[in-house]
Image (cartoon, rainbow, N blue to C red):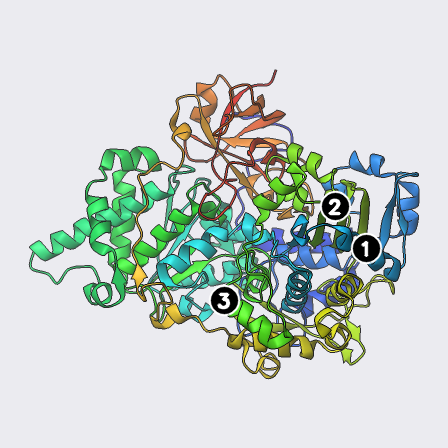
Amino acid sequence: MAEKRPDGIEDYAGPAGGWDALRATAEALVHEKIVIQGSLALLKSNQPDGFDCPGCAWPDPKHTSSFEFCENGAKAVTWESTAKRVGPEFFEEHTVSELWTWSDYQLEGKGRLTHPMIYDRSTDKYAPITWDEAFAVVGKKLNELPDPNMAEFYTSGRASNEAAFLYQLFVRAYGTNNFPDCSNLCHEATSVGLPASIGVGKATVVLEDFDHCDAIFSFGHNPGTNHPRMMTTLYDASRRGVPIIVFNPLKERSLEKFAAPQNPVEMVTLSSTPIASAYHQVRSGGDVAALKGIMKRVAELDRENLEGGGDGLLDRSFIDTHTEGFAALLEDLAKTDWESITKKSGLTREAIDSAALVYVRSERVIVCYGMGITQHRNGTSNVQQLANLLMMRGNMGKPGAGICPLRGHSNVQGDRTVGITEVPNKALLDGMEKAFGFRPPAEKGHNAVEAIDAIIAGRSKALICLGGNLAVAMSDPGKVFEGMRRLELAVHLSTKLNRSHLLIAEQSLILPVLGRTDLDIQESGRQSVTVEDSTCMVHASRGFLNPPSEHLRSEPAIIAGLAKATLGDRYGIDWNGMVSDYDRVRDKIEIVFPDFWDFNQRIRQPGGFHLDIPASRREWRTANGKANFLIASGLEEDPRLYQPDIITLTTVRSHDQYNTTVYGLNDRYRGVFGRRDVVFMHADDLAERGLSDGSKVDIVAAPDEGEDESTTRVVAGFTAVEYNIARGSAAGYFPEMNGLVALTHFDRKSGTPSYKATPVRIRAAS
């Protein structure tokens, strides 16, 4: 590596956490001008009488900790509770055309929205509108559409259970199942893949299982940035000697070493604790090959043990009693050759052998995984291979063992649980009919990719977004932006300004909502909402800060207003009653979804309650009543990834970022400061292309299936940064790299875009 690094690039040697994390938290408080108020908010974060952090979905230790927030959680809290405001006077000073030239960081950095606004084409500005007028505009346009299926209703994972439930009630009463959702963009491969394997698309473990496991296998995630409170769990496991086996293309600091801010000895001595006991840098797109390699070696070790007079290393009692398809899996593994496994995975035989040995020597194993597994063309198969590996030794449905999908936003899983799905099942339809007296449509609606396709083609004319920044989160933004500008109606329920608001439709409205930290007072008094974490715990969240403006309304109140303006008194739904007291919303949730029995009573218990997960007690709600070993066809996700001049691009978040929200321009753990225009590459891949650390490069996507060679998607003028990443892989920031990902580049089984394995060519900048 060159002695002189590119501007803004440093060799960062510190651990994750530690003093730098505390310093970054303090800087976030100062930046948002809320040193006192923000400090009070952080002490209420993830507490029994406080609010659930609007960041990640990692579970809390029974919601009883006196200090249960992390650096990036602090950024999320301060970002929302900022003293900065974006009101009518701001929009009076800035046209939409001007705002379009601002960066996403600048847009969101101006502060909280304070008034409902509507776009005025004559001035090219957003102007204030009353709530009643805004609701009337939306209701009129929705009722003018010839078909309810010409409207799309997007949901962000930050919406509460109560808001999401009312939203799906409104939309289904309107007459469609078009629910593009942020789950479609991240963990839909889990929601599709795991039910076929084990009957449920959720974690089978709870937080306490990590106290009893003998090994943790970590695939495709970066906990220090994306779910930082998990670091305490990994830290504790490491300190009690649990092997943590990591598979990830990039070396991520939080998986190498961590200094716990709560540990006074480490803070005073500037020491840290190693996290990964082994770190295997699998090539991007090589996950199936790596997993088949581990399973193949486990099967070989089992056979060797039996031949030596042992009892074998597989849990044959579990396999025989609870599963189907194991013989076919063994046959597939036997015909998969080692040369192909090592070539496609980028791992050596020794690395795979060592991981298999840890696995067979551990009685209780937990597998954790993130979007490095799901956001692939074969994301569903990736997830199912993880389940296969666990089931080989009965590591499913017993204490200290199981599967743990790492969700993103703090309630992305809960939204799906309470009905945000484009594929309603009979139980949901029956429950809605029982609770509200009407039967919703049963036809499949649109997921995110299908919704965008319909918008671009002009088949869908209206888009309502319950939070989020859909246009920026999607792949191929050029096509997405163009399509959204042709909409007849665009409505955004938001806390802050973002780029999606600037894609002006014939009628565009911004409706400001209360945030997770804000006090929510309705007719019956102070309200609580609920959220579900990654391990299926449901608990209450109560904001306590005075809202940024008296003109803000809660998400449930806004949804009810839209519903009344659109539906009138259709079906006799008591929108006013439910908004006046959210207990009434929860009563209806309990009717539709019986797993929420005694909902209002149980959320008033410290720590909330755990939803029933049949697979955790070895009850399989699959079509055949068994857990299923499911085979992945071949080893290649995409044959283009192995062409000589191709490098596999994966998108990542910076440490100053959560999803599309950019808190700052630093990525401390990767040594990037004050910039985001970089692509991380292996030294040998740079040299092979005549490049070096600091070279200016253009990144050109290979044409996707069905595209001819004249199709070009280019990100130009970026800086190549030499980094410890798997050979043949490169990484760049989301969403800057989304322009390289074709809308057709997604998992056909789940619809999840393949942000983690895009074939590209990288060359010196033209």
Q: Residue at x 24, y 50 (%)?
A: 329
Which badge, 2 or 1, is on the more N-terminal residue?
1
Q: Residue at x 51, y 53 (%)?
A: 223
Choose between 684 and 173: the one closer to the eye: 173
- Marker count (numbered): 3
- Numbered circle sitting on residue 140: 1
Residue 54 position within the rendered picture, expressed as x and y whole percent measured from the top left = 65, 60
Choose between 310 and 142: the one closer to the eye: 142
Choose between 118 and 384: the one closer to the eye: 118
Q: Residues within 10 Å of mark 3 (few under 14, many from 20)?
A: few
- Numbered circle sitting on residue 129: none
- Quick one: SS at disc 3? helix
Residue 297 position within the rendered picture, expressed as x and y whole percent measured from the top left = 22, 47
Relative to residue 367, is residue 247 depicted above or below? above
Which badge, 3 or 1, is on the more N-terminal residue?
1
Residue bearing mark 3: 426
Residue 549 position within the rendered picture, expressed as x and y whole percent measured from the top left = 86, 62
Disc 1 residue type?
Lys
- Quick one: SS at disc 2? loop
- Numbered circle sitting on residue 498: 2
Disc 3 residue type?
Lys
Alpha-carbon span between mark 2 and mark 1:
25 Å
Q: How crowded is mark 1: few (under 14 residues within 10 Å), some or many (20 or more)?
A: few
Q: How crowded is mark 2: few (under 14 residues within 10 Å), some or many (20 or more)?
A: many
Mark 2 or 1, which is nearer the eye?
1
Alpha-carbon span between mark 3 and mark 1:
31 Å
